[in-house]
Image: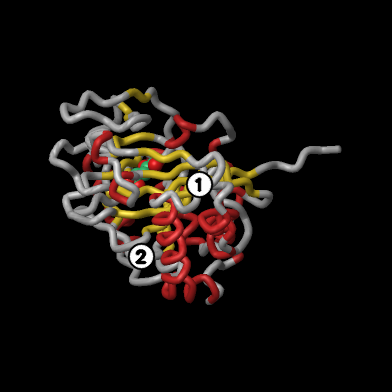
Amino acid sequence: MDSECAASRLRVVLGHLRRPSATAVAAHLTSGAISPASFHPQQFQYTQDNNVLSLEQRRFYEENGFLVIRNLVSDADIERFRNEFERICRKEVKPLGLQLMRDVTIAKSEYSPNEKAVTKVQDFQEDKELFRYCTLPQILKYVQCFTGPNIMAMHTMLINKPPDTGKKTSRHPLHQDLHYFPFRPSNNIVCAWTAMEHIDRNNGCLVVLPGTHKGTLKPHDYPQWEGGVNIMFHGIQDYDENNARVHLVMEKGDTVFFHPLLIHGSGQNKTQGFRKVCIITPLHFPKMNG
Ligand SMILES: O=C(O)CCC(=O)C(=O)O
């Protein structure tokens, strides 16, 4: 990608991200902004025809591979997810099949039954309280814009990015989520990532390479990082260094939906707090004949 093209893409992306709130987006949605005359569904490859997204939002996702919806999940819901996560850390509940992950720099001797020892819980489908995230009507409403109806939640995570110990292990290397999924087609999969607090470059926000969802799945491997790498934190070795990068600054409840081929990662957490997000990867499940 040449620098002129990258700069122009960046201007569009930053314009989208500067939208102040979901209210603005919702107002746009309900104001009849989709003009049937200019609406050509056959142009769209990555979004569905369901009249939830505005034409502008659809075009943005088609071009860039992600879409931020502001203020989508309520503070009350986020508080409930946070409380349940803390109960899991204290071992007050042990949902079946749940996997707990720890940062590579936290020594076994330092494990303590609180949030400090757990950097990620994965596969929370048997935890009713956390799984509510995957059933929130407002999340599903947007998920369907990318997957179509008949949704299955294939992968669930709550990430608790710890303060970096100085070894930069809290970074998440640039990767494509499709690398981790044995299901296809990729265009019927979307990832929903909801900020559980204010997230910016200080505490390790998501960084995305707009437009990379139009590429193919690339080989992934553990990056050669001096300080160590967390288990399964695979990264892409060869991506276009000139591709624009966008750091997604998000407020509590904001949600970004992104394509599983979009190259993304997250930076170090340079604060003393634990940066939390809820993530699901829903997959469209087509009806079989007969
Ligand atoms: O939230 C993060 O730090 C990055 C998460 C991520 O990219 C992933 O789990 O695929």
Give the camera-side residue of 91 and 101: 91
> From the image, which quarter does the N terminus lie in?
top left
Q: In the image, what residue occupies the spot 32% across and 61% down?
A: 250
On the picture, is 282 further left or further right than 10?
right
188 is higher (above) or lower (below) than 8: above
Q: Quadrant of residue 19?
A: bottom left
Most foreground residue, 67 or 36: 67
Is residue 119 left or right of 284 when viewed as pictured? left
Q: Amino acid at mark 2?
A: Lys
For the point 28% across and 58% down, the residue is 199
Give the residue at x 51% y 32%.
181
Residue 198's tag is none
How crowded pointer 1 is (Cα within 10 Å; few <14, some 14-19, many 20+) is rated as: some
Q: Which residue is mark 1?
A: 94
Going from N to C along the chain, the mark reached first, 1 or 2, is: 1
Under mark 1, the amino acid is: Lys
Question: Under tag 1, what secondary structure?
Answer: loop
Identified at 56% across, 67% down, the residue is 35
> What percent of the width, then of the height, locates residue 124?
52, 47
In what quadrant does ligand 1 lie?
A: top left
Task: Classify mark 2: residues with Cα within 10 Å, few (<14), some (14-19) or many (20+).
Answer: many
* Residue identified by numbered label 2: 252
